[in-house]
Amino acid sequence: MFELLGIPPQALFGQVLLGLINGSFYAILSLGLAVIFGLLNIINFTHGAQYMMGAFVAWMCLNYFGINYWAALLLAPIVVGATGIAIERLLLKRIAHVDHLYGLLLTFGLALIIQGLFRNQYGSSGLAYQIPAELRGGQNLGFMFLPYYRGWVVVASLVVCLATWFLIEKTRLGAYLRAATENPTLTQAFGINVPLLVTLTYGFGVALAAFAGVLAAPIYSVNPNMGADLIIVVFAVVVIGGMGSILGAIVTGFSLGLIEGLTKVFYPEASATVIFIIMVLVLLVKPAGLFGRAA
Amino acid sequence: MKLKTLLATTAFAALVSAPALAQVSIKIGVMNDRSGLYADLTGEGSAVAARLAVEDFKAAEKGLKVEIVSADHQNKPDVGSNIARQWYDTDNVDVITDVPTSSVALAINQITKDKNKIFLNSGAASSDLTNKACSPNTVHWTYDTYALANGTGGAMVKAGGDSWYFLTADYAFGHALERDTAAVVTKNGGKVLGAVRTPFPGTDFSSFLLQAQASKAKVIGLANAGGDTINSIKQAGEFGITQGGQKLAGLLVFINDVHALGLQTAQGLVLTESFYWDRDEGTRAWSARFAKAHNGNMPSMVQAGVYGAVLHYLKAVAELKSKDPAAVMAKMKEMPTDDTLFGKGTIRADGRKMHPMYLYEVKKPGESKAKWDYYKQLAVLPAETAFRPLSESECPLVKK
């Protein structure tokens, strides 16, 4: 059957694996968006810029302070997450009671400002960031050459995704979060500090974006537009999965990476569009998304 | 009394009219990518280069009043066309210069012809600008896909890379570069095994690189530019493509791309440029001035080209004391060009600026002695062999 499509099975396995690797970025980024939307009802358009900041903080750590990749993997999400907390406290909090659209406009504006500032400082063609020495090279799997780093990206993002899912769906803290989403007033009446929960959740969602940014730094060009190019696709992923659905974000992230990967083999010209075609189809059939609950 | 009035009036009239007669005011529009992937190699740097040209020409002393405006075309033909129309129709812009991104450049080429203005292109690559789409109002200054194909492509085939697979950015520029390079490869006895068209701009090229790897071609030709090239080279290293014996041919690599990749990743790349800051005394001195005015960044060949083109245009206008487009274009083609950055050259009937192209190899990290010390020169391609000969031209302006 594979031969009928003109592609040997080995090549196909390789492409499926690559699709999963790209899917890991979609999964982590859309997960962050889903967490933020689920609790704050904010469509966080700054997400792409925060992903970019993650990559830049990793670069700054290395070049200004000599801090290596592994430490940056922990440090960058904390630093960028802290800026996220500041944004939530200073700006988003003030518009929490108004229509979604205001949050969208505010975060979109912030994204443009952040990107502009970075472009002004570092230019648009990007910065060099090497793969950490421990993960250089790769393994020949017979059907393809798998760089160790890509393998690490899949493992790291799977672990982070599952941990997040576990945290929100299976722990007491997660139960508070979900309760605060359902009914903030009642949850607060039980003595739970909902505003703090909201702030920390935003910070956490942003930290996820920054984490993805650090993961991306060694393999993609580190430049101020790196997030803007990706964020539109990630939004499509979230919409397809269902706004606010944690599991939806993870599953759709990986599977759309896969579909996109296959399109790159069969009809490369359409690989930038295929996700949006799927989005249209899903919205026509299930307006709340594959995993979403109708409002 | 009468005589006194007469004298005073004459003196007054002379005072008013003399400078008015001599002065020609010119408005130059620098249009390029100021926020996207080509912003570093064109962008504000091109405006800086244009200002340096006005400064060096001492335009004011020669009776020229030059104003420079700039705009961001965002690499979109529709945005670029709108700006061009507004500049020509309401803002009295006489010349548009730079314009990277071939799809935008081809649109501006047509509009400039329709409005009878002048287009000094430096940033775009498509050789169609002086071939099929050539225009009496356009000069294509810095480089083109034909010269890149000839330089890098020809050198790779001669070095034994006789089978090719292309990664092609899916728009006018990528298609032109692939076409011109494939022609050079076949002409030199090599063959093209296949090509994949990648959406522009792209982030992940690993899938396309694996397809190229599977083709077993000796050379993978990167018919893309800017961020696309950076990502493909970075990821080719990661997937062990170069270690596996296949060679990468960066068909259009700018010094800013090498800067962004770092020498560790970029070392050994062979590339073709018409300008490198560290070529001789003159280019070093000019580049130092440029860097001072542009945050310490060295000029790309595109920015250098804007300087050369604007300087030559100003010379022609000063000579004629008029900015009539037809007369200025004729003068620009008649006068030999001469500047510190590109040396002596000419502009052909089809609008092609003729100067040598240089084949460079990117240095190893150990060989680089200073910031921006990136290239060693492999060969000089004389203008006549670098660019498409007029005998092969499809341009109607060329009389055969």
Image (cartoon, rainbow, N blue to C red):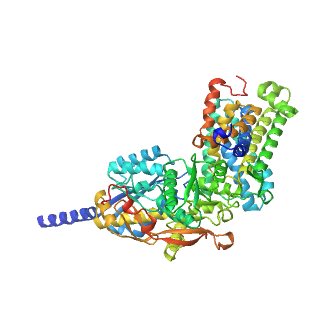
Quarter of the image where one finds residue B239: bottom right
Residue most toward the left? Answer: B2
- Work out whether residue B118 or residue B54 is closer to the camera in this orientation and state it: B118
Say left or right for B172 vs A264. left
Q: Quadrant of the C terminus of chain B?
A: bottom left
Q: Considering only vertical position in the picture, is B366 above or below B237?
A: below
* Percent x, y of residue B133: 39, 52
Q: How many marks?
A: 0
- Work out whether residue A286 or residue B392 is closer to the camera in this orientation and state it: B392
* Percent x, y of residue A284: 62, 25
**Taking the image as drawn, is residue B72 in sight?**
yes
The residue drawn where x is 67% and y is 40% is: A3
- Work out whether residue B257 or residue A141 is closer to the camera in this orientation and state it: A141
Q: Quadrant of the N terminus of chain B?
A: bottom left
* Percent x, y of residue B345: 40, 70
Quarter of the image where one finds residue A188: top right
Q: Considering only vertical position in the picture, is B393 above or below B4?
A: above
**Taking the image as drawn, is residue A295 in sight?**
no
